[in-house]
Image (cartoon, grey):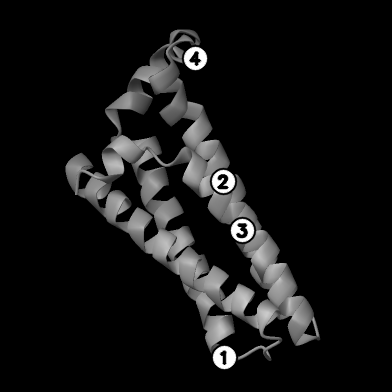
Amino acid sequence: MYPIILKIHQILSWLVLLAAAFALYRSWRGIIFKKQWFTADKRAGLWLLVFVDVQILAGLLLYVVYSPVTRIVFTNMKAAMADAPVRFYAVEHILVMFVAAILVHIGRAKARNTQFAARKHRISAFFYMLATALILTRIPWERIFTL
């Protein structure tokens, strides 16, 4: 089951990045060209949110249930923290991805609850950019290209 969930997690990584790129495109398009907040803008944020949430779910399944790396970590946390690659998966990756997911949720909620279109675009651009930057820093790039 581990290889299947890992492959799903890898594929979802690309979907998250594509959704983030599209949501950022819609936000910046709205800012630069002073566009109204359209249904497509709302849906771009929704798709980003959905893909991020499904990705978090797949990641949690790997982390808690299936990953052999986390089994090693849970048996000897001190030794795991001394090993940089193991620490990356055990702490850094999951922590930063959770923060990025929270930023996506905050950005979408704030944009949804704001009245003016210009402000909606600025808020979504800000939060989605922060989340995307965090995601890009913690993707294990050597693994993501092994589709």
Do callouts 4 and 2 mark residues in contact (Cβ within 8 Å)? no
Q: Residue furthest right?
A: 115
Q: Residue at x 42, y 60 (%)?
A: 16
Mark 3 — residue? 129
Q: Could you tell which of marks 1 and 4 lies nearer the N-terminus? A: 1
Do callouts 3 and 2 mark residues in contact (Cβ within 8 Å)? no
| Nearer the camera: disc 4 or disc 3 | 3
Which amino acid type corresponds to the residue marked 1 in the rendered image?
Thr
Q: Kindly report the distance in space between the C-alpha atoms of the residues bearing marks 4 and 3.
A: 29 Å
On the question of residue 113 being in view, the answer is no
**Residue 87 location (% of width, % of height):** 46, 22
Q: Could you tell which of marks 4 and 3 lies nearer the N-terminus? A: 4
| Nearer the camera: disc 1 or disc 3 | 3
Q: Residue at x 29, y 45 (%)?
A: 144
Q: Kindly report the distance in space between the C-alpha atoms of the residues bearing marks 1 and 4.
A: 46 Å
Q: Nearer the viewer, residue 14 or 29?
A: 29
Which amino acid type corresponds to the residue marked 3 in the rendered image?
Met
**Residue 48 location (% of width, % of height):** 49, 68
Q: Is residue 60 left or right of residue 1?
A: right
**In which image quadrant can residue 131 be found?**
bottom right
The label on residue 81 is: 4
Q: Nearer the viewer, residue 66 or 6?
A: 6
The label on residue 134 is: 2
Mark 1 — residue? 39
Do callouts 2 and 1 mark residues in contact (Cβ within 8 Å)? no
Q: Residue furthest front?
A: 32
Which amino acid type corresponds to the residue marked 2 in the rendered image?
Leu
Which amino acid type corresponds to the residue marked 4 in the rendered image?
Met
Q: Residue at x 23, y 49 (%)?
A: 7
Instruction: Decide: is 111 above or below 94.
Output: below
Locate the N terminus and report the quarter of the image it occupies: top left
Q: Residue at x 56, y 49 (%)?
A: 133
